[in-house]
Amino acid sequence: QRFPVVIVGAGPAGLTVGNILRAAGVDCLVLEAETRAFIERRPRAGVIEEWAVRGLQRRGLADTLLERAQLHSECEFRFAGDRFRFAYGELTGQHHFVYPQPLLVTDLVHEYADTRGGEIRFGVRDVRLHDLETSRPSVSYTDAGTGERQLVECEFVAGCDGARGVSRTVLPHTTHIARHDYGIGWLALLAEAPPSSDCVLFGIHPNGFAGHMARSPEVTRYYLECPPGDDPDNWSHDRIWAELQQRLGADGTPPLTEGPLIEKRVLDMHNYVVEPMTYGRLFLAGDSAHLTAPIAAKGMNLALHDAFLLGDALVAYLGKDDGSGLDGYSQACLRRVWDYQEFSQWLSEIYHGTSSGDEYRAGTTFARLRRLFTSPAAAAAFAEQYLGTAAAY
Ligand code: FAD
């Protein structure tokens, strides 16, 4: 078996690369460890920046998203018993699109496999990458149905297999992996309850950060800061809602609408960045190359950015023998990656400074927050970074 490109992982990054290749008539194979039903239901992200939506739209991948996504142009900080609206849409002319990741993945799989005729093998096991430093690499895996090993030869491997995939593990020791651990946990929750506000809410509270993000008219994502490595079972239904009500409470606002919790897991807030994002004929894209804790809701946006660049660069190379996109790929991705890492770090201090138990950090956190609402220049800078418009694309 031979394909010009093998893509490992059918998340937003891998499926977008696959769709770009198929639209240009480049054959490719996607290998995915899970089933189609599983990846179409896996809940995660839900906020996509406008430039990323336009990138999908230009590639014919946003029709359903544009019909169904909610547009957000404001967020609200709640602290010291008060609420402060921040109208970032007015400052940038751009929006966030609220569209749950499983819906985007469903659209991308459908377009790739059912419309553009791309091949995807689900449930593969023990994927291994071979001869990456040659011009004839290959990928082997165990077939889900037969249990037999299969070998696929190719020209390029796109490593889009997320934070726990195989691609990052084959990098040589000359690759740098910069890591940052916030030393903080977040209890990530999905509630079967309608959103309690028409925008994202950030609760800055001495007990810890709390977040509220709409996902759909029936489902809302919430976050609660907690100790890293905390056991989700320490958090009963009643304790969760009491903390959310307290941390997100503000004068003159009705209580949050409560409901059953359908997801409850602890995320340890940490980041990493792989430099360079390439090794021979292997090109990493998305979470396999860089992780940003969901502090600033950036991960899926970065995955899409990589995928646009990688898809276009592979098409240019395979179709027109133009290797400039592939040569500059890692550097072009990393500019936005580091920009978003820095913003996440900055925002993390706003979220977690007041609950750090350190009066000095609490004082500087409030200074940062006040500046957002008193200095037009600070507000404009925040809006640009929040929407990702400052990083060149
Ligand atoms: P993934 O989506 O992880 O896809 C990788 C795929 O590879 C998976 O389907 C996996 O099954 C498959 N795979 C793994 N290993 C192998 C293997 N060995 N062989 C074959 N296949 C393999 N980002 C945002 O932008 N906005 C948000 O609001 C946001 N909220 C988030 C909330 C939570 C709770 C979490 C956990 C993440 C959030 N993110 C958010 C981050 C976002 O979900 C990720 O950045 C995004 O999924 C990355 O896409 P990807 O394609 O790189 O990787």
Image (tube, rainbow, N blue to C red):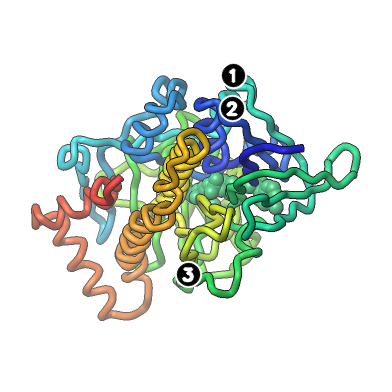
Task: Give x and y (percent) for residue 385.
Answer: 26, 52
> Closest to the observer: 49 or 335?
335
Q: How crowded is mark 3: few (under 14 residues within 10 Å), some or many (20 or more)?
A: some
- State the mark number for residue 264: none
Q: In which quadrant of the rendered image does the N terminus lie?
A: top right
* Residue type at tag 1: Thr
Q: Residue at x 39, y 38 (%)?
A: 196
Q: Name the residue under label 3.
A: 184
Residue at 25% over, 61% down: 80
Which residue is found at the position 21% from the left and 43% from the top? 88
> CA gap, disc 1 to disc 2?
6 Å
Q: Is residue 390 above or below residue 371?
A: above
Q: Nearer the viewer, mark 3 or mark 2?
A: 2
In this view of the protein, can residue 257 be seen by the observer?
no
Q: Quadrant of the C terminus?
A: top left
Residue 307: image location, x then y, percent: 47, 43
Q: Name the residue under label 2.
A: 112
Q: Measuring from the top left, give residue 261's x and y in whole percent.
A: 58, 44
SS at badge 3:
strand
Where disc 2 sits, the SS reads helix
Of mark 3 and mark 1, the one earlier in the sequence is 1
- Residue 33 vs residue 176, the one in the foreground: 176
Task: Pick whichever of labels 3 and 2 is earlier in the sequence.
Answer: 2
Dividing the picture into quadrants, the one containing residue 67 is top left
In the rendered structure, find residue 115 and report the number of the disc placed on it: 1
Q: Residue 257's spot in the image, x, y percent?
A: 44, 39
Q: Is residue 296 left or right of residue 83?
A: right
- 237 w.r.t. 22: above or below: below
**Kind of residue sitting beneath label 3:** Ile
- Residue 182, by quadrant, is bottom left
